[in-house]
Amino acid sequence: MAEPLLQVTGLTRRFDISKPWLNRMLEGARHQFLTATVGVDFEIMRGETFALVGESGSGKSTIAKMIVGLLEPTEGRIRFDGQEMDFASGAAMRALRRRFQMIFQDPFASLNPRWRVGDIIAEPIRTFGLLPGADIPREVARLLDVVGLSGADTGKFPHEFSGGQRQRIAIARALSSRPEFIVCDEPTSALDVSVQAQILNLMRDLQDEFGLTYLLISHDLSVVRHMASRIGVLYLGRLVEVAEGKRLFTEPQHPYTRMLLDAVPDLALSGRRRKPVTGEIPNPIDPPPGCAFHPRCPIAEARCRETVPAPRPTPTGTAACHLAG
Amino acid sequence: MAEPLLSVRDLVVEFPGRRGTLRALDGVSFDIAPGEVLGMVGESGAGKSITGAAIIGLIEPPGRIVSGEVRLNGKRIDNLPPEGMRRIRGRRIGMVFQDPLTSLNPLYTVAQQLVETIRTHLDLSERDARARAIGLLDSVGIPAAARRIDDYPHHFSGGMRQRVVIALALAAEPDLVIADEPTTALDVSVQAQIIDVLKSICAARGAAVMLITHDMGVIAETADRVAVLYAGRLAEIGPVRDVILLAQHPYTRGLMGSIPTLSQTADRLVQIPGAMPRLNAIPPGCAFNPRCPQAFDRCRAERPMPQDRGGGRQVACWLGAEVPHG
């Protein structure tokens, strides 16, 4: 089997959400931690689209931020192309960072409103010293053309563009350092559906053209189904299931995945009666013991309340459930 | 068709601005029958929320209804004085907005807010109003309603808060509930619960629903009929199955094709080129003509009005339109 491009092992991140020191002293308040992700393991192969889905608070964005180096993991390791990410070494991180980029959800917040589009796109090229200054304008025009904008747009400011066009600018910026791997955090959630279709199609075309590898973070199962070759399902910071793209939808293994699929309103008008989903996501500061999903799980047993299930192989991938497989 | 509960005719809403007047709604007409769920879809800026706001008289000045009329049970309500409109809001038309935190007052308990709303509209004693409030919370699926009614909004999760807002909207037994993106701020697993509650409680009380959303999946599973808006105009309206599966307007067809579904097999999504025009730059003729793959000369010159196509469907498109004789 080929070497994975990205390998994540035991990724855990805790946030200290304690009250300030003085309050702790005076009120006897204790240290409090929010565990955003616990022991997440997955691999992404070169050229594939791996998607992480989950509801808010499931740890999707925390994982994305750790992978691109915006957050340091509390525990666990991230290997990119066989090389361990070392957060302590600035030079090593910098060399790696050119090779991966990120596209964020909100194209209104991710582009500097005071910069012209040409400067926004040229910044990674200049920072990494990829091209001599004289060649940069031609490269920027080429990138704009690649994402479906015009080379004449370089002198404009972000506010002169619509949401979809801004997301194209963000994609052009991500491509400018010639990365191999792009983390897309909810790239179309802020866009209207007809514009979403344009961006998703563009992302696919770019993947074919440049051999890109994507990590796609989304809460929208239909988008994920359309884009991903493999999918990981997160619940309360734990990876509960990993499966091949389409098979996750036809043969869900984990009860949470099944519940999530039942809950999604779909356009297909299949007339299927949705099973009523019960309960809500528990508070991540104080997650339930054992399997985090057991209070909402229709098939939970005694051991689910006590022991945390380890991922086990299933016909479609792996699932962290005592009763799956 | 029976007498419509709500009837909107040729509604035009404009917002005067420094750089000219923006027409946010341009000649929109539709009816809602008693007990019916009408879905209202469109992309941002298409005029979905403005339609809802115009019906309940909540257009922010300087925006105003320029022409057209809104009738509730045959009586005009668009020209009522503010006091008269206030009696209709809440009593005859309930409202559910996207963000439950903005519809609830954080400084009052749920009980205080519900009892106040009930007593404003119905002649009940404090005690009876409270009993009724507990019954309402119970019917929207809040566990231990009798105890939780004295909690403040921040004690509830997002999904539970939206249930409280639905209870509040239904407190005075309105004939119509306008729900503007009621599930957009919620997670999918909770979204389905809220849609179920909204649908079943309105059906049980015979209230009609105008459901405004950009989520076609929600519409497909909830609405009886659906209206598609584009650039402030009605593109197509009809029974939900027909509009989704056999869309006649090229915009509706493109919109449906552009949505990834859980069962599709296509490799690429249908793509409508371009974006919806800004309201100050709507092209002459059909507003959709620059993006339409089937546009012809007439579409660029003359605006198509919604025309009956049988089966309760109206389509505003020159394609397949009947040419008047003579």
Image (cartoon, rainbow, N blue to C red):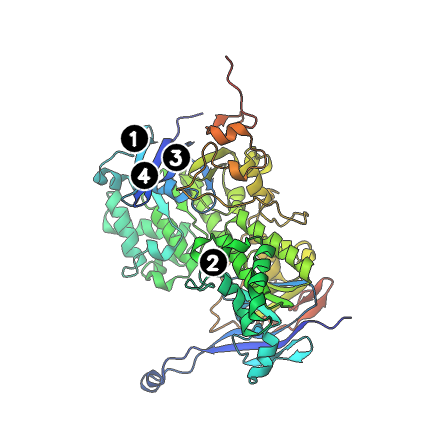
- Both on one chain, marks 1 and 2? no
Which amino acid is tagged 1? Arg
Secondary element at image label 1: strand
Residue B4: give x, y in percent of width and height. 39, 29
Depth check: give the residue in front, A22 or A216. A216
Q: Are marks 3 and 1 in contact (CB under 8 Å)?
A: no
Residue type, mark 3 in image: Asp
- Mark 4 to mark 1 CA distance (whole Å): 13 Å
Neighbor class of circle 1 (other Cα within 10 Å; few <14, some 14-19, many 20+) is some
Residue that mark 2 sits on: A155
Rendered position, B198 above or below A313: above
Assign a secondary structure to mark 2: helix
Residue at disc 4, secondary structure: loop
* Residue A110 pos. (x, y %): 47, 64
Q: Earlier in the sequence, mark 3 or mark 1?
A: 3
Per the image, the residue denoted by label 4 is B92
Q: Are marks 4 and 2 on the same chain?
A: no
**CA gap, disc 3 and disc 2:** 35 Å
- Subunit under mark 2: A
Q: Amino acid at mark 2?
A: Gly
Chain ID at mark 1:
B
In primary-sequence order, the first of circles 4 and 1 is: 1
Rendered location of residue A180, percent (x, y):
65, 68
Q: CA distance from mark 4 to mark 3?
A: 26 Å
Quarter containing the N terminus of chain A? bottom right
Residue at image mark 1: B76
Instruction: State the residue lying farthest toward the right.
Output: A1
